[in-house]
Image: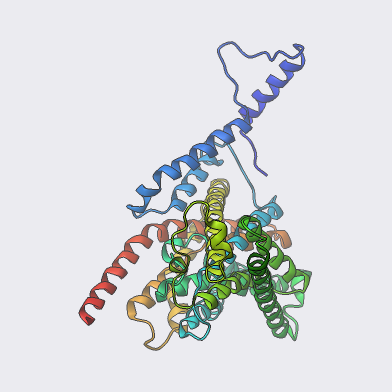
Amino acid sequence: MPVPGHSADREHKHARHAHDNTGGATARPHGRHIIDTATLWYLIVGALLISMGLMESLLERLPLSPAMFYLAVGYALGPSGIGFVGFDPQLYPTQLKIVTEIALIVSLFTVGLKLRASFREPIWWLPLQLGILSMIVTVGLLTAAGVWLLGLPVGIAMLLAAILAPTDPILASDVQIQDAGDRDRIRFGLTGEGGLNDATTFPFIMIGLGLTGVAAGVEYVEPGAVLKILIEFFKGTVGGLVLGWLVGRLVLFLRHRFRMALGMEEFLTLGMIALSYGFAHLIEGNGFVAVFMTGLAMRRIEYTSSGEEAPGEVIGPVAAGEEEHVATDPAKAPAYMTETVLGFNQQLEHIAEFAMVLLLGVLISGMGMSWEGVGIAALLFFVVRPIAVLVVMPGRANTRIQKALMAWFGIRGIGSLFYLAYTLENLWVPGTMPRFVSIVLTVIACSVVIHGISAKPLMELYYRKTDRQARRAE
């Protein structure tokens, strides 16, 4: 849990003691004003949030991402900086797992809402190739590196590989779909990958735990484990699609027929996320794929109604006071519901990014950077990821520059942090886990910085080249 700065805590206790001995009048040292820890937190968080609101337009013009700023601030607040706060993931893995889990499922639902395309379109092969096949290759190569280069046991090496394998659906906003209906192959592929591979990572985490003797993972290394994994995916997929479709249709029915269920999209969003995740666990399905599919089902309702026309064009301008009319219009209601939910969810994502990367900075400040982690990061970004992408994406469907950019933008983040916490909650190996934790945190931090710097310039270069090619074709 957060550890307040010791000096501030001692002063707070001293002031409270003085209060108790003066009949209600707090005695203060002459010339000093004592600020308690809670007040400092309000000041720091408030200043950070306002700073980001003011700096957003500036950051858009620079090769920087908000996550880089949050990471630096978190590090400065942690033990290696001013020491205002500390958090040891080895002591509080459950708390870390809960907060990262919430951030992750919010983002997975958002990813599902962004992917607007007919299931018959070939572009869907991109998320499948990247989110499943590429992830499997990545786990295999990183496991080998963990055994041969780091000298880790096979089980620990597979856990490290599985933790670092998933790309991030939160921190990759600069390279993901910006508007529903965007069919750019790079953005569509990377967005779908972020929605799928947090789910496809889970079985490998359990296999790694099983190889280390953890009871919860033993059944994943026994005969029939592949069937069990496939059944979990099937249950999560079907459960998420059915629940998303039923709730979406229920809302639209109530709005059309009875002018009910109007507004409160915030409750609808959070309710669908929690319900699909909980339902998936209830039926022993994969919860992450269920949440992703729930968002996809809601988008499918809108796409079936609107067709190829963009949701914004279907809705049209909405004057003040006309929201209820648009929300109940049979032609506009599906687009209005989906876009409103997406807008709210994207705001939640910004808050989740702020909180999670700030926490990441604090964790690194306490655990320290690892040279082994830097080496694994270089191996992952420059060797493993390119091989994994190029192996599963043969043929000429994608241009050379598209393949290169998809190979480069394997951004690591909150998914890896969640699976790190999940592993720490289930496994502890004396003498190994501090090294293990430091490697993971270092790789995530390297990704935040390196990919944060390169995302905007490379994507701008890609679009300039694409525009030139389009003009030549004309």
Percent of width and height locating residue 369: 51, 52
342, above or below 96, in the image: below
Percent of width and height locating residue 273: 66, 63
Residue 143 in view in this figure: no
Residue 72 in view in this figure: yes
Q: Residue furthest bottom?
A: 395
**Of 121 and 330, the residue lying toward us:** 330
82 left or right of 387 in image:
right
Percent of width and height locating residue 109: 59, 66
Tell me which residue sits at (72%, 62%) in the image: 427
57, above or below 176, in the image: above
7 left or right of 371 in image:
right
Quarter of the figure with the C terminus: bottom left
Quarter of the figure with the N terminus: top right
**Of 297 and 262, the residue lying toward us:** 262
Tell me which residue sits at (75%, 86%) in the image: 223
Percent of width and height locating residue 218: 76, 75
Tell me which residue sits at (42%, 65%) in the image: 175
